[in-house]
Amino acid sequence: MTKNDRFFKILFAVELALLPLTIFAHLFLPVWAVAIFVVAILLAKIWMELFKDRRNRSHVIIDAIGSICVFTTLLILFIIAGYVNKPLSIVAIVFIIIMNLLLCLMHDKVFPEFIDAVDYCYMLFECLTLVAFVFLPFEYDLITNIGLFAILLTTVVSIGYKLYVFVRYDVINANFRHKK
């Protein structure tokens, strides 16, 4: 295990450990306390990106699990609190899960630079949405809705292209090999 690998896994543990503390802060502490834990999650996610090795399959899987857990937990928390648009958040959660599953399943595929750029945009929109979550308890839901809509758009483009590649090359090639 390399030093970067160890730091990446420790930051993943920190990111997930902060989620129950965020829920605790929402239930028992003042409104501004939630923002402190969301900032800590954002910082852990940024540091994880610095230590992540994109060629390492376990790093991609760990990052996908973290992304799904963070956004599912925070969006459900903010839906219950009444801070975010419920249908937009539910659709965003579904697309985030599908996007991260496809990132894990199609890790070894070579995609054009356009789709790699869309995946980087997705990561940046994740960070933008986490920044918006910091201000969400103070009634700034417009920025959060814009961030969720941006995540939704990038995930739709990425999912669509990856499904096209899967159907076009994997399914057609499998049928062709099967007929021989």
Image (spheres, helix red, strand yellow):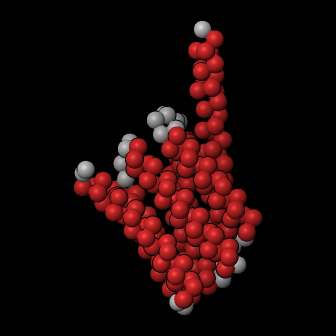
Q: Nearer the viewer, residue 100 or 42?
A: 100
Question: In percent of the image, x 49 and y 74: which residue is there?
Answer: 20
The residue nearer to you, when weighing 2 against 50, is 2
Residue 128 visible in the shown view: no
The number of numbered discs placed on residues in the rendered structure image is 0
Q: For the point 73% across and 69% down, which residue is it?
A: 86
Image height of 119 relative to 49, above or below: above
Q: Quadrant of the C terminus?
A: top right
Placement of 11 over or under 167, stated as above or below: below
Residue at position x 39%, y 64% from top? 13
Q: Position of residue 102 (x, y in %)?
A: 56, 43
Residue at 45 percent of width and 54 percent of height: 63
> Furthest-bottom residue in view?
30
Q: Relative to the observer, which residue lies in front, 42 or 104?
A: 104
Residue 95 seen: yes
| In the image, residue 91 above or below residue 144 | above
Return the x and y of residue 37 as percentages of the image width and height: 47, 78
Answer with left or right where residue 88 lies relative to residue 125: right
Instruction: List x then y, in percent, for residue 153.
Output: 66, 53
> Residue 133's quadrant in the figure?
bottom right
